[in-house]
Image (cartoon, grey):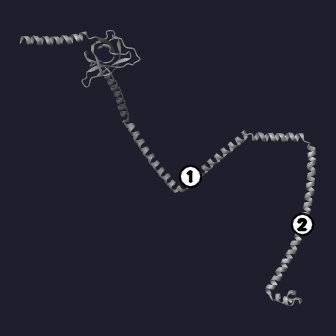
């Protein structure tokens, strides 16, 4: 029994010494976080410190800064070689629904330098403060809403609102009647409206075509102006002007006068020939007319008395009394 108690006591003592020595001889890095005008309610000594959700140490001590009573300094004991950057922040977060708080280190960029042990980590935000701030904002907004509601429910404002509602109702009725009238007018003149719209569409199409043709004409004019044709025409006009300037204008005028006189004589002769031909043609027409009249008269008489043809064949030299008549 004594041996058993001795062995058990030795194992227990060894275990206590082992873990205590391990804790005592384990190297730690000390950092500080100073929170000013931020409540640290819920933080306790020995609470865990996390880095992006990973436990990296504990809270070693919480004190009030003697030089600034509005600041609370939290001492952190972190594992050796924990990579704390200069731009990292220590936020106060909640542990579930227990009300206990912890510090979680967040942020830090790869470009920033490492923060030396014994330095101060930048303070972050507190969930309690954020909730409190939001609650204050919500309370202010609720107060404004209640004040506006109270102003809204005053008798004078209610009367104005009632009058406004009645006015809006009247306007709605008038608008409804106007819409009905417009609908009636449109229904009665639907054909005319469609015809007008169709005509307007035709006119628009024609205007589009005219615009297209006008643009094409302008393009052609532009091409003509920019081409060598206009330069050639101007050159020809210039050559003609030079030729006229160098030519004997007086001789040219005399030649033109001679040609005009000869042309006039020729025209007189042609006119005389035409007059003579016209007279001969008129005489021929007159004789032809007389011949046709005689033939018509003869045809009429033969039609009245066909026996004339028979008697004329048998008694050729005997005068026909009917023909004399």
SS type, badge 1: helix
Q: Is residue 311 above or below residue 169?
A: below
Q: Residue at x 81, y 41 (%)?
A: 236
Between 290 and 151, which is closer to the camera in this rendering?
290
Q: Nearer the viewer, mark 1 or mark 2?
A: 2
In terms of secondary structure, where does tag 2 sit? helix
Figure quadrant of the N terminus: top left
Crowd rating for badge 1 (residues with CA inside 10 Å; few <14, some 14–19, many 20+): few
Residue 85, percent from left and from top: 37, 16
Residue 18: x percent and y percent? 20, 11
Q: Picture quarter containing residue 103? A: top left
In x, y percent, where is residue 137?
35, 26
Residue at the image position 21 percent from the left and 11 percent from the top: 20
Spatial distance from mark 1 to mark 2, Cα to Cα? 68 Å
Number of the label disc, if any, that sits on residue 186: none
- Would residue 249 appear left or right of 97 to someone viewing this image? right
Q: Quadrant of residue 240?
A: top right
Instruction: Mark yes or no: residue 70 visible.
Output: no
Q: Position of residue 309 (x, y in %)?
A: 82, 87
Residue on which the image places disc 1: 197
Towards the viewer: 163 or 17: 17
Of the residues under marks 1 and 2, which one precedes in the sequence?
Answer: 1
Residue 175 seen: yes
Q: Quadrant of residue 107?
A: top left
At a point 91% along the width and 63% down the height, the residue shown is 273
Q: How many marks overall? A: 2
In the displayed structure, does residue 301 sit left or right of residue 40? right
Decide: is 292 above or below 204: below
Depicted 268 relative to depicted 296: above or below: above
Quadrant in which the C terminus is drawn: bottom right
Residue at numbered disc 2: 277
Q: Residue at x 81, y 82 (%)?
A: 299
């Amino acid at each position: 029994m004594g041996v058993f108690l001795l062995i058990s006591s030795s194992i227990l003592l060894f275990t206590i010494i082992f873990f205590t020595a391990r804790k005592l001889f384990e190297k730690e890095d000390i950092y500080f976080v100073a929170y000013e005008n931020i409540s640290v309610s819920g933080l306790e000594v020995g609470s865990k410190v996390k880095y992006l959700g990973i436990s990296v140490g504990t809270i070693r001590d919480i004190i009030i800064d003697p030089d600034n009573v509005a600041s609370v300094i939290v001492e952190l004991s972190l594992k050796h070689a924990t990579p704390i950057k200069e731009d990292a922040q220590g936020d106060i977060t909640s542990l579930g629904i227990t009300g206990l708080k912890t510090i979680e280190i967040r942020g830090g960029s790869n470009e920033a330098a490492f923060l030396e042990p014994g330095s101060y980590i930048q303070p972050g935000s507190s969930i309690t403060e954020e909730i409190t701030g939001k609650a204050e904002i919500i309370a202010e907004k609720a107060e404004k809403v209640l004040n506006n509601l109270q102003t809204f429910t005053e008798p004078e404002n209610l009367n104005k609102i009632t009058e406004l509602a009645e006015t809006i109702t009247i306007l709605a009725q008038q608008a409804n009647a106007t819409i009905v009238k417009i609908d009636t007018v449109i229904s009665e003149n639907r054909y005319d409206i469609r015809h007008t719209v169709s005509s307007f569409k035709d006119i628009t199409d024609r205007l589009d075509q005219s615009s297209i043709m006008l643009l094409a004409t302008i393009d052609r004019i532009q091409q003509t102006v920019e081409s060598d044709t206009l330069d050639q025409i101007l050159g020809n006009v210039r050559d003609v002007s030079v030729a006229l300037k160098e030519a004997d204008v007086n001789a040219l005028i005399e030649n033109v006068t001679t040609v005009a006189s000869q042309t006039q004589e020729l025209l007189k002769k042609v006119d005389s020939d035409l007059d003579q031909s016209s007279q001969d043609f008129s005489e021929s027409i007159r004789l032809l007319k007389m011949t046709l009249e005689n033939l018509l008269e003869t045809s009429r008489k033969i039609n009245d008395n066909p026996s004339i043809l028979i008697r004329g064949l048998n008694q050729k030299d005997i005068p026909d009394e009917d023909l004399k008549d």
